[in-house]
Image (spheres, rainbow, N blue to C red):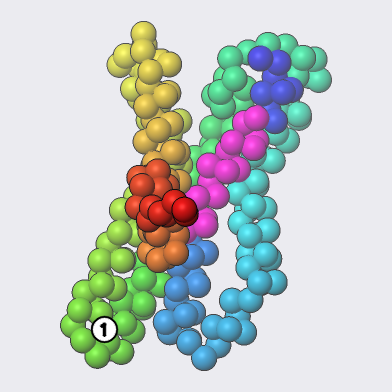
Amino acid sequence: MTVGVCCIFIFIGSNVYRNTPLNLAGMAIERFVAVCYPLHHGQICTTRNTKILIGIIWLVGAVPGIVDLLVVLALRPLSFFTTSRICFHQSVFDFEYNIISHAFFNIGYMCLVWVLLFYTYFKVLFSAKAAASEPAQAQKARKTILLHGVQLLLCTLSLFTSVLDEALTSFFPYYRSEIYFCTFILTSILPRLLSPLIYGMRDQKFKKYMKSSLICGSDKRAIAPSD
């Protein structure tokens, strides 16, 4: 693929890649406000503020891609963007500066999201236990936090996909395509699949229509023909 076109795909893909853990951090902030500051939740978590948060997430996720592109523009001639290469990150952004900035942003994002989620979720857990009138409610809160911990673990794996790909391809160089496909499913598709399933199946209306769709509407009552 032409390098210029490849850079566009890599920029969009890397931005979306990093947005998943950042989205999870934004959800943690909303949960924190809803549980710990319920009286201010309606004022803080408005539609306008949600749109601003989404914009910030996309902007923060785009920073590493912008840095990589600026490094290549500074150190490569413009004719480089008209050449053809295999389209993956290490093939296009192969300078030492790209490797260092890639590791720096990945570690920084991972630490930021983990610290933020640990803080907010533990605050939510303690607040839920203190306010719960029944032990079952506290147990439900603990299960929710555990579930998000698993999701966060899968999301943070996406920050180290390139390292995982390099490690596996060094041991199995003849299975590069298979390795890239499997790591893509594990670190990209699976974490993004969990969120709609977790939050969608909790919504009773969504759950009802999903169940009806999966069984092809076979639960519909038959209508007796009129005479």
Mark 1 lies on a secondary structure that is helix
Total count of labels: 1
Which residue is farthest front? 227
Q: Residue at x 56, y 23 (%)?
A: 88
Q: Residue at x 63, y 68 (%)?
A: 50
Residue range highlighted in magenta: 9-24
Q: Position of residue 187 (x, y in %)?
A: 40, 38
State the image coordinates of residue 156 (x, y, percent, origin top left).
41, 47
- Residue drawn at x 59%, y 20% is 87
Q: Position of residue 66 (x, y in %)?
A: 69, 41
Q: Is residue 151 visible?
A: no
Q: Residue at x 53, y 46 (%)?
A: 18
Compared across the picture, whether 186 is left or right of 94 comes to left
**Which secondary structure is most common in the magenta stretch?**
helix
Q: Is residue 173 above or below residue 212?
A: above
Q: Which residue is mark 1?
A: 129
Image quadrant assignment for residue 134: bottom left
Q: Quadrant of the N terminus?
A: top right
